[in-house]
Image (spheres, rainbow, N blue to C red):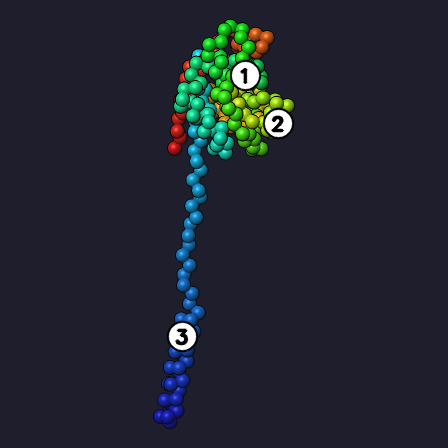
Amino acid sequence: MKNLTLLIILSLLLSMGCTAQTQKADAKPKEVETVKEEPKKQAMTEVVIETTLGNITIALYNETPLHRDNFMKLVNDKFYDGILFHRIIQQFMIQAGDPDSKKAAKGQRLGMGGPGYTIPAEILPQYSNKRGAVAAARLGDQQNPQRASSGSQFYIVDKDGGATHLDGQYTVFGEVVKGMDIVDLIAAQPKDQGDRPTEDIKIVSMKVVEKE
């Protein structure tokens, strides 16, 4: 009887030991959850354009870095200070950036001046010639099949609904974020047959504003 009792106890102990080992073997280490941080989006650089009719603030797209960096360099070098808006067409666009306009006589035709270089096109489908778009002027396709941009001349779209017929042809590198009423005011000024304002509209200064 004692032997039988011992055998039962031993059997129970062995059974408990196997169960414990099985549970231990089956136990899996708890997975540590890792939270992936979204990459921080680079803030757009803003530029304040002070004109004789009021201020316009534009934001430069990071996706067009050649145009962004060139524009910032010209602003910091004070290239645009004193330059005129030499071409205005209401419900289309206003254009500036010709350094020859700084000392231009009344009625003088403008639009061919620049810093002496062009910028490779950065034409992106996500950026259209919407109202308020800032884009680079350039020579036509016959002279410029690569659609390289002027090194300094730019236009701001004034048209309600945008100038969609220009999409895919010019590099759009920014947009107006404040002062669209000033763009409209400039576009509405009296002009001559060459679309130059009869009274000079000057860029007094430009200033780069770094956004955090």
Among numbered discs 2 and 3, the one appearing first in the sequence: 3
Q: Residues under labels 3 and 1: Cα distance?
A: 86 Å
Give how far across and how far down residue 202 sits, in percent: 46, 12
| Quarter of the rendering occupied by the N terminus | bottom left
Q: Which residue does the image show at 41% across and 61% down from the upper left?
A: 30
In this orientation, which residue lies closer to the viewer: 131 or 89? Answer: 89
Residue that protrudes farthest toward the front in the picture? 116
Among numbered discs 3 and 1, the one appearing first in the sequence: 3
* Residue ID for mark 3: 21
* Residue ID for mark 2: 145
Residue type, label 3: Gln
Query: Is residue 29 positioned above or below 40 on the image?
Result: below
Give how far across and how far down residue 157 sits, in percent: 55, 21
Residue that protrudes farthest toward the top in the picture? 106
Q: Residues under labels 2 and 3: Cα distance?
A: 77 Å
Residue type, label 2: Pro
Q: Residues within 10 Å of mark 2 (few under 14, many from 20)?
A: few
Q: Which residue does the image show at 39% across and 82% down from the upper left?
A: 14
Query: Is residue 10 positioned above or below 80 on the image?
Result: below
- Tell me the element at label 2: loop
Query: Is residue 37 positioned above or below 127 on the image?
Result: below
- Residue 57 appears left or right of 187: left
- On the question of residue 43 being in view, the answer is yes
* Residue ID for mark 1: 112
Residue type, label 1: Met
Give how far across and how far down residue 107 sits, in percent: 54, 6
